[in-house]
Amino acid sequence: MKPYAFFLDLDGTYLSGNHIPEENIVAIKEAQKKGHFVCINTGRSYAGIGDKVLHSAPFDGVVAGLGTDIRIHGESVYTKRLQPETAAKLVEYYLSIPGENLYLSGENVCFVTNPDFASDIHVVIHSAEEYREKYIKAPVNKFTATVHPEKSAIEPYREELNLYYYPKLIEGTVAGCNKATGILVAAKKLGVPIERCVAIGDSANDVDVLSAAGIAVVMGNHEPGMEKYADFITDTVENAGVAKAILKLIEEN
């Protein structure tokens, strides 16, 4: 039996809000019992995933921060970070826009520039000076912001960033990194060829990995247009679509 390596998006795929369908956890354990591998593959940074999700199932690995932070069986195998000055300039820019917010997230800590967006995992940055003095050396893998920056603000860093635009958000990380590059590294470490890699996702930042993986599974609650990247469409996140996809494939294996 040749194993599959499953790579699961989190938000809108493995979990909905804070809810993880129990069927997903059961299916992951069943797949692993049969010799398959199951990994997280998320846009969230490692620090942003949270212990509840990280420890909800015995994952074989984590591809975090859009492929910038990869860990297999607890070992760090790949890391890329935003340039500290780029992060500092983004902080300065978003602090100048009243009511909006910048999330900066990394391996150990997550920052916000607007306290209204803070949760218990976030450090609030009150000024650009504070960030430079206290936090500029903190590793940052990606950012998410609530408005699209003006071209003049982002253009100086365009070559070093990989950007995803959404109706109300922009998501950015290190150029050359995405969920697809992440699974290539992880799959090699696991000893699984790309044609045996299964990507499961629901949104625009999953396009790269769905296109690269041997098998592409799109959630029933997917964003418009995502169906064209799917080998098959599973059920919705609320109806444990991840579990249904995993069980379908391992039973057919």
Image: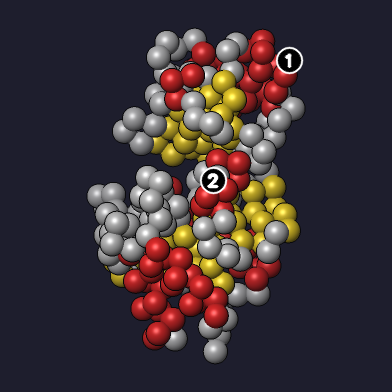
Q: Residue 216 lies in what quarter of the image?
A: bottom left
Tag 1: residue type? Glu
The residue that label 2 is drawn on is 49
Q: CA distance from mark 2 to mark 1?
A: 26 Å
Q: Position of residue 60 (x, y in %)?
A: 61, 66
Q: Nearer the viewer, mark 2 or mark 1?
A: 2
Image height of 19 relative to 216, above or below: above
Instruction: Work out whether mark 2 precedes mark 1 in sequence or the reverse, and give the earlier one.
Output: 2
The answer to whether 223 is drawn above or below residue 216 in the figure is: above
The quarter of the image holding the N terminus is bottom right
The outermost residue toward the bottom is 1
- Mark 2 burial class by Cα count in 10 Å: few <14, some 14-19, many 20+: some
* Badge number at residue 143: none
Reading the image, the residue beneath label 1 is: 133
Whether residue 168 sits left or right of residue 32 in the image: it is: left
Q: Quadrant of residue 164?
A: top left
Look at 71% across and 23% down and name the residue there.
136
Q: Is residue 102 above or below residue 50?
A: above
